[in-house]
Image: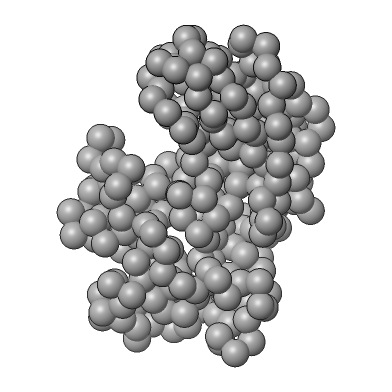
């Protein structure tokens, strides 16, 4: 288990009263425990908190007034990581998949697995159907897609990334998810705080359902997987945006930090390990 202190501070200028939905609080589940948290909003407002239907993502709705608006969130989070032997993890045939994983097999707004089916089959179709095939997908993306800030926007899809061969963390995750789904591997988008990410920012990675659980992957290789603190999970980035404005807004500041407070788990690092935080 690891304990992290995390903080995010966001500042905006709004040209009119604007409803906003924030998704900046880590989810609580069997692997993550919120030890303590604080939320500060300026001007002082009472947000409405609600949880997602499928993954219990935590959302805050705020009716922000015109002018300057700030939201700050801090928390201490305990994360228990599951470590598995990748050599023993197999893909689960569609007929045996748990029902609650099936909607992560379908194409979604940013992950057009149907359009990328041919490329996925030509590159990965003949590989052994186990953990190593998802690793091969990550390796392919890391080798063939340039990580380049500013190379994509909110409309960029997995198909665009496969064509343009450049993107950022969300694009890497979308492409990996689309490849997995094309191969009948359920895959889902993870938004996260990430320890050791430079410069600090909200991070995107993904999970693939293999064997009997969701395993974590990150084709960017920018952070250690055991430094990921899950904020939320969805079909793609459209489900888990950290801020959704129903009106015009200008971002003035975004400051994030993640610090490791303590580490109590012992791991055997002789060889590769699969990691899960579900």
125 to the left or right of 202: left
Work out whether 62 lies above or below 87. Answer: above
Q: Nearer the viewer, residue 100 or 186?
A: 100
Work out whether 160 lies above or below 66. Answer: below
* Residue 119 locus on image (x, y percent): 25, 75
Q: Nearer the viewer, residue 6 or 275?
A: 6
- Residue 170 can be seen in this image: yes
107 to the left or right of 100: left
Residue 142, picture quadrant: bottom left
Q: Nearer the viewer, residue 157 or 193?
A: 157
At a point 38% along the width and 66% down the height, the residue shown is 178
* Residue 106 locus on image (x, y percent): 46, 72
At a point 79% along the width and 53% down the height, the residue shown is 30
259 to the left or right of 110: right
Residue extending farthest to the bottom is 95
* Residue 187 locus on image (x, y percent): 51, 66
């Amino acid at each position: 288990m690891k304990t992290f202190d995390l903080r995010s501070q966001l500042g905006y200028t709004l040209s009119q009263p604007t409803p906003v939905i924030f998704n900046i609080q880590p989810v609580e589940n069997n692997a993550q425990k919120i030890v303590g948290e604080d939320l500060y909003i300026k001007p002082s407002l009472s947000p409405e908190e609600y949880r997602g239907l499928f993954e219990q993502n935590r959302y805050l709705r705020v009716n922000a007034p015109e002018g300057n608006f700030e939201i700050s969130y801090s928390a201490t989070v305990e994360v228990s990581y599951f470590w598995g032997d990748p050599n023993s993890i197999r893909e689960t045939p569609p007929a045996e998949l748990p029902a609650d994983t099936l909607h992560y097999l379908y194409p979604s707004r940013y992950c057009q697995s149907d359009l990328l089916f041919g490329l996925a089959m030509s590159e990965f179709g003949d590989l052994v159907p186990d953990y190593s095939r998802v690793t091969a997908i990550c390796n392919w993306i890391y080798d063939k897609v340039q990580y380049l800030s500013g190379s994509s926007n909110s409309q960029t899809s997995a198909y665009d990334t496969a064509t343009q061969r450049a993107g950022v963390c969300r694009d890497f995750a979308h492409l990996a998810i689309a490849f997995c789904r094309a191969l009948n591997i359920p895959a889902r988008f993870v938004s996260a705080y990430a320890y050791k990410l430079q410069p600090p920012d909200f991070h995107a990675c993904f999970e693939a359902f293999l064997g009997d659980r969701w395993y974590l992957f990150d084709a960017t290789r920018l952070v250690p997987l055991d430094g990921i603190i899950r904020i939320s999970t969805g079909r793609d980035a459209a489900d888990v945006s950290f801020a959704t404005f129903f009106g015009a807004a200008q971002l003035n500041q975004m400051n994030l930090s993640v610090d490791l407070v303590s580490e109590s788990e012992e791991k055997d690092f002789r060889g590769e390990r699969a990691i899960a935080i579900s």
